[in-house]
Each structure stands twice: as C-alpha cells, then as structure tokens.
Image (cartoon, rainbow, N blue to C red):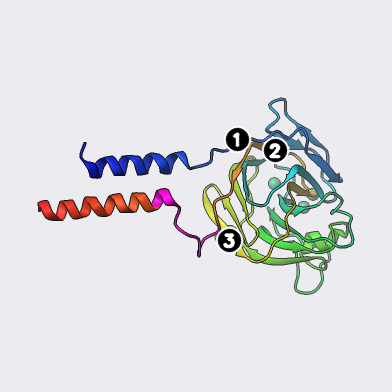
C-alpha cells in the first residue's frame, strides 16, 4: 500500500468511527399530557395512542436540543383523518400553560374546517408551527391560529395528507438555530431561527390508533452552513488531493 492510499484509508476509518450511532430510545420514562392514552410496547421502543380527542402529547424524559430522534409512524385505522405529529422544545405542563415556547410539527390527512377564523382552516398536509400559549384552545391547534403560528409547510407534503395504514420513517433534527424534519429520508422542513430547548414529544389531535415504532436517538448533525469541516473530512480531502496529484504525475 503506498503512502497516499494509507493516508486515505486512515482518513476514511476516522470518518466512519466519528459517526455517532443511534441507540434505541427507552420510552418507559416518557410522560403524557392531554386527552390521550399512550401504551408503550414490551420492546420499550414503540408506543400506541388510542383516543380520538383533544390534543395529547407523549414527551421524553430528556431535553432534545443537539439530538436527532428517528423512527416510524403509522395510523392503523381507516376511520378518521385528523392530526398526527411531534413537538420539540416541549416543557412539562405546556399543553395547558398560558405562556409557552415550543415547536409543533403536525400532519393532517384531509382538509376540515371546524369554524376557524377567516383565512385559516384545518389543512391537510405537513406543517411546522410555534406555540406560544399551550394547546388547550381546540381551534388554535386545529386551525393554526391564536397561540399556534405556522412557520412553514412541507416541501412536498405541505398539502399532501398521510395515508391510512402506511408506515412512514421520520427524522427530527433539533438544534438551537435550525430544525430539520425528514419523511422517508426526504427533507420536508428546514427552518432557521432561535429555538428554546425542551423535550421531544409525539402529538395527536382528534386521531386514534397512531403507532410510533423503532424509536431511536443520537447526536444531531450540525446545522447547515457556517460550520467548520470536521477534521476527518478534511483529511479525506487531503488524501484525495494527494492521489489526484500522483495520478497527474503518472499520466
Ligand atoms: Ca382515514
Ligand atoms: Ca376529522
Ligand atoms: Ca377525529
């Protein structure tokens, strides 16, 4: 093995070893608020919510900032068409609190207006919102009005509802200045801002039979832009440059 190939091999091994591995998330210490019934499976990495009712959140026992939460989500019924999703930066008590600062990521199957204010409706599709006054006012959560301010809608799923009995992979990447949400590996939401730390949570509104499975968490990748190249990547670049120079000399 020549020197350049050795350098490249070392750089590659450093690069791979620096990738943090996701670990299964134990959901048994998580807590629920609101009108839901959350049953953790025996494997401790899956949970099923069975009530069609007011907003409910099932939230982690750790703060989410700087971490990535991944898994899959399935609505295991054909009988309804309402909201499933997630919260980020949630604090215990936030469902009913008068003043909050957390992020709501919700996904509705079909359009449905329940008496929203002018210019609002319960839109089908995936959206991200900031919640500044809890979720105890039903219309605020449903219509994205009042205490729920919509920030963005999904790139391809912004106006596309979820399908009954279809399992979707999700990734939630939560940093202080950037949030990314992927569905089946595609980046749907990518917003910059200043986000308060708090818990990860699962969210249902007026939707039963929602299963979150194979939940795992890991260190979040850094937000895009303005981030120094990690040393292993710089070494790989150096290795490639040396190889290119050697090849040019040989040619
Ligand atoms: Ca349905
Ligand atoms: Ca409905
Ligand atoms: Ca419903």
Q: Main secondary structure of the magenta part?
A: loop
Q: Which residue is mark 2?
A: 211
Residue 138 placed where, x, y %?
Answer: 86, 58
Residue 50 on the magenta span: no
Real-space CA distance between mark 3 and mark 2, rounded to the nearest whole angstrom = 25 Å
Residues rendered magenta in the picture: 223-233
- Among the two numbered marks 1 and 3 on one chain, the one whose residue lies closer to the N terminus: 1
The residue at 70%/55% (across/down) is 106
Mark 3 element type: strand
Dot 2, crowdedness within 10 Å: few (<14), some or many (≥20)? many
Q: Nearer the viewer, mark 3 or mark 2?
A: 3
The structure residue drawn at horizontal position 52% and vertical position 60%, both measured from the top left corner, is 224
Element under disc 1? strand
Residue lying furthest bottom:
118
Categorize mark 3 by other alpha carbons within 10 Å: few (<14), some (14-19), many (20+): some
> Which mark is drawn over residue 190?
3
The front one of 118 and 126 is: 126
x, y percent for residue 237: 33, 53
């Amino acid at each position: 093995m020549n020197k350049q190939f050795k350098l490249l091999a070392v750089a590659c091994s450093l690069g791979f070893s620096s990738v943090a591995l996701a670990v299964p998330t134990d959901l048994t210490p998580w807590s629920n608020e609101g009108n839901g019934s959350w049953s953790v499976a025996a494997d401790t990495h899956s949970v099923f919510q069975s009530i069609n009712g007011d907003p409910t959140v099932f939230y982690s026992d750790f703060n989410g900032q700087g971490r990535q939460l991944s898994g899959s989500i399935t609505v295991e019924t054909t009988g309804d068409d309402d909201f499933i999703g997630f919260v980020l930066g949630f604090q215990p008590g936030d469902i009913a609190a008068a003043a909050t600062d957390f992020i709501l990521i919700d996904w509705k199957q079909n359009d449905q207006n329940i008496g929203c204010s002018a210019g609002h409706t319960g839109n089908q599709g995936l959206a991200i919102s900031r919640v500044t006054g809890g979720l105890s006012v039903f219309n605020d959560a449903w219509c994205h009005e009042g205490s729920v301010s919509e920030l963005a809608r999904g790139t391809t799923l912004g106006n596309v509802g979820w399908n009954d009995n279809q399992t979707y992979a999700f990734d939630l990447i939560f940093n202080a200045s950037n949030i990314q949400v992927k569905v089946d590996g595609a980046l749907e939401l990518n917003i910059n801002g200043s986000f308060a730390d708090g818990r990860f949570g699962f969210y249902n509104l007026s939707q039963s039979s929602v299963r979150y499975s194979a939940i795992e968490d890991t260190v979040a990748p850094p937000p895009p832009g303005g981030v120094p190249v990690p040393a292993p990547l710089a070494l790989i670049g150096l290795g490639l440059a040396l190889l290119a120079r050697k090849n040019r000399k040989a040619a």
